[in-house]
Amino acid sequence: MNTIDAVQRRRALSEAVWRLILRDGLSAASVRRVAQEAGLATGSVRHFFPTQSDLLVFAMRELTSTVTARVRAAAEGRAQDEPIDRAIAIFAELLPLTDRTRAEFAAYLEFMIRARTDPALQAVARQTVEEVRELVITVLTDLRELDAVGSTVDPRTEAVRLHALIDGLTVQLLIAPATVSRDQARRVLTDSITMLEHHR
């Protein structure tokens, strides 16, 4: 199999994995079902993913890449906006505010639960959390350097609070949507960030 074929096959497998996860949940992403979904022989899929754990690690990394690309697009698309509005747009991409992102973050939550007992997934899960925290720190640091938030705002300290808020809203939107609507979650996020403007 040449390099181009391998890349195309991997892309096809990635799409098959996500069709299954978004449609039927994380438990549906077995090597056999992914092979069926992609129209490939099970042995062909095992060439890329010898074990179920290998497949799930791949799927979780693909999810992270998807969210990262969406965050980057939000940042670039709002480059001319006011810094606070741009920050809100970036952080909103970390919440399940659409049907598509709800499915993605539901899978993310399943990954996190499974990572408790899967050492391979645990490493990816920890890396994902660290990357989100660094993103929040970076955005807050930019806001302070642009004088868009108060000079007393400490990006690292504030990132812990904001990251916890995002995670908490995500869990509520996924597990108990009757307790908070998407509009309410967006307003809470917006209010939390705009309040930083007054930290002088």
Image (spheres, rainbow, N blue to C red):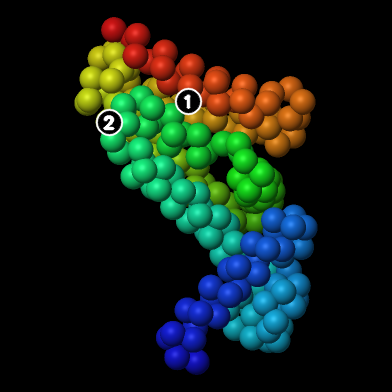
Crowd rating for badge 2 (residues with CA inside 10 Å; few <14, some 14–19, many 20+): some
Q: Is residue 197 above or below residue 65?
A: above
Under mark 1, the amino acid is Leu
Q: Which residue is mark 2?
A: 142
The residue lying at 38 percent from left, 15 percent from top is: 196
The residue lying at 31 percent from left, 28 percent from top is: 83
The residue lying at 43 percent from left, 37 percent from top is: 90
What is the residue that sits farthest to the bottom in this orientation?
1
Locate the C terminus and report the quarter of the image it occupies.
Answer: top left
In what element is the residue under mark 2?
helix
Q: Which residue is mark 1?
A: 162
Under mark 2, the amino acid is Asp
Q: Is residue 112 above or below residue 22?
A: above
Q: Is residue 61 above or below residue 95?
A: below
Confirm whether residue 66 shows in the render: yes
Q: Nearer the viewer, residue 23 or 159?
A: 23
Return the x and y of residue 154 as percentages of the image width and height.
Answer: 32, 20
The residue lying at 63 percent from left, 48 percent from top is: 100
